[in-house]
Image: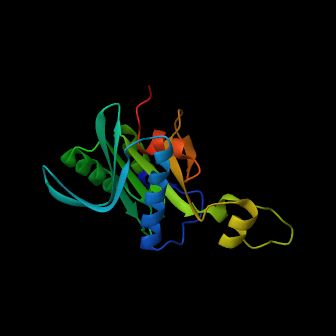
């Protein structure tokens, strides 16, 4: 088995429609507005770069310390885990349009090779699941998983959530950070890469 065959996915994929996916991703970036001024999220943005025009699932533009930043976003609802090649394509698009950051959301997880490439090239990877899968119970009577409504009503869990994936400090180690609208500081620091003062 190669590193590319090693799939990084810990939770079941989200049962999410394309429009729900776009709304959730936009909402995640909009949540950073609480700690970042002049942020604009655009769904289905077309940008012309040095290699032609590209249609992005979303773009995020913000201003920090007098500098304008652009982040390009792609959302993948694939059956199979995302391979390194798709992340390489996103990197090429970043270079072509002069983006400062790229973010890829996936409902199917990522192969380890994709994660390693993303880390080296400043691309954020996020697996998307349902909030109800973030709460796990163990019971002798094999209770079914929470419904979306139960998760929201009883535990205040979001309908959808993501996990930012990055390699750890030691070989084979992987770190996950919860990404949702309740944690705008993670969105700002990990997905937008706002410079620290």
- Of residues 74 and 108, the one nearer the viewer is 74
For the point 79% across and 72% down, the residue is 143
| Image colouring | rainbow
Q: Height in image: 64 above or below 128?
A: above
Question: Would residue 136 be visible to someone looking at this image?
Answer: no
> Picture coordinates of residue 70 (x, y %)?
30, 45
Is residue 51 at all visible to an observer of this figure? yes
Please report the residue visible at 41 percent of the width from the left and 36 percent of the height from the top.
194
Q: Quadrant of residue 193?
A: top left
Determine whether, in the image, residue 26 is placed left or right of residue 85. Answer: right
Name the side, left or right, on which 113 lies relative to 8: left
Q: Which residue is drawn at 59% across and 51% down?
A: 182
Residue 51, percent across and down? 13, 53
- Compared across the picture, whether 14 is left or right of 81 comes to right
Callout count: 0
Looking at the rendered image, the quarter that the C terminus falls into is top left
Front residue of 148 and 167: 148
Residue closer to the observer: 111 or 41: 41
Provide residue 104's location: percent of width, then percent of height.
39, 54
**Image vertical order of residue 110 relative to residue 139, above or below:** above
Instruction: Name the side, left or right, on which 183 lies relative to 152.
Output: left
Residue furthest top as drawn:
197
* Residue at the spot 73% in from the left edge and 60% down from the top edge: 155
Q: Position of residue 98 (x, y in %)?
A: 22, 43
- Of the pair 4 and 135, the residue shown nearer to us: 135
**Furthest residue to the right?**
140
């Amino acid at each position: 088995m190669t590193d590319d065959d090693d799939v990084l996915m810990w939770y079941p994929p989200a049962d999410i429609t394309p429009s729900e996916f776009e709304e959730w991703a936009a909402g995640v970036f909009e949540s950073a507005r609480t700690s970042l001024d002049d942020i604009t999220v655009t769904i289905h943005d077309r940008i012309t770069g040095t290699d032609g025009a590209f249609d992005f699932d979303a773009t995020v533009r913000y201003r920090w310390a007098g500098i304008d930043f652009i982040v390009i976003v792609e959302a993948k609802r694939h059956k199979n885990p995302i391979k390194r090649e798709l992340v390489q394509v996103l990197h090429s698009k970043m270079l072509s349009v002069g983006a400062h950051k790229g973010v890829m959301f996936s409902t199917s997880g990522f192969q380890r090779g994709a994660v390693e490439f993303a880390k080296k090239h400043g691309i954020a990877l996020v697996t998307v699941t349902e909030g109800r899968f973030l709460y796990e119970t163990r019971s002798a009577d094999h209770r079914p998983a929470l419904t979306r409504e139960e998760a929201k009503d009883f535990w205040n869990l979001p309908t959808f959530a993501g996990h930012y994936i990055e390699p750890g400090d030691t070989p084979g180690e992987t770190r996950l950070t919860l990404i949702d609208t309740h944690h705008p500081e993670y969105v700002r620091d990990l997905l937008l890469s706002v410079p620290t003062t």
